[in-house]
Image (cartoon, rainbow, N blue to C red):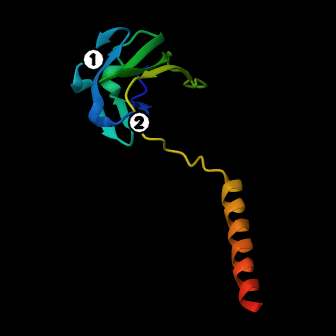
Amino acid sequence: MNSNKELTFCADADISLFVEVRIDGSVVDPKNYSVTSGSTIVTLKPSYLNTFKDGEHTIEIIFKGGKAATTFKIAKQSSNSTATTKNTTTTNNSRSPKTGDFTDAGIYILLLGMLVIAILGVWKRKMV
């Protein structure tokens, strides 16, 4: 509360699918947040955050075909306060591209071994 800090959430969905933001079930006026790409990044403005009572709140980022939801906590500011958040459910029926590299190095090693054997076989035939 009254920290004058923004609160940022990132959802793993394309920004072109973004529809709206809801907090505690109510639609948030777009003037109270900004949306940027990099998946979809929603940043709540400090002036809007100051209107909340202390306690836990739910944010939902709504997309065409799904939504991402989590909770956040507004706490009275004290000298040793820390912000905590926890991830909850994400449901998204749209197809987002995979962003990690999940290839298995074993496949490449096997292909390299087969290539070496093939080259040695061809080389041996030419020698005979």
In the drawing, does residue 13 fall left or right of residue 70? left
Answer with the quarter of the image where residue 36 lies.
top left
In the drawing, does residue 112 fall left or right of residue 1? right
Relative depth, front residue between 47 and 59: 59
Give the residue at x 33% y 15%: 22
Does residue 46 sit above or below 120 in this rendering? above
**Three-letter amino acid code at the position of disc 2:** Ser
The answer to whether residue 33 is seen in the rendering is no
Whole-number angstrom distance, CA of label 1 to CA of label 2? 25 Å
Does residue 108 sit above or below 3 in this rendering? below
Q: Single out the residue that lies furthest toward the bottom.
A: 127
Callout 1 crowding tier (Cα within 10 Å): few <14, some 14–19, many ≥20: some
Q: Give the secondary structure at mark 2.
A: loop
Relative depth, front residue between 11 and 7: 11
In the drawing, does residue 43 fall left or right of residue 105? left
Quadrant where the C terminus sits is bottom right
**Three-letter amino acid code at the position of disc 1:** Val
Q: Position of residue 31 (x, y in %)?
A: 22, 26
Q: Which residue is mark 2?
A: 96
Callout 2 crowding tier (Cα within 10 Å): few <14, some 14–19, many ≥20: few
Task: Tell which tag, 1 or 2, sits nearer the viewer.
Answer: 2
Give the residue at x 39% y 29%: 4
Does residue 47 sit above or below 105 in this rendering? above
Q: Give the secondary structure at mark 1.
A: loop
Quadrant where the N terminus sits is top left
Answer with the quarter of the image where residue 26 lies.
top left
Q: Position of residue 88 (x, y in %)?
A: 53, 18
Give the residue at x 68% y 70%: 115
Q: Position of residue 61 (x, y in %)?
A: 36, 22
Q: Which residue is mark 1?
A: 28
Q: How many marks?
A: 2
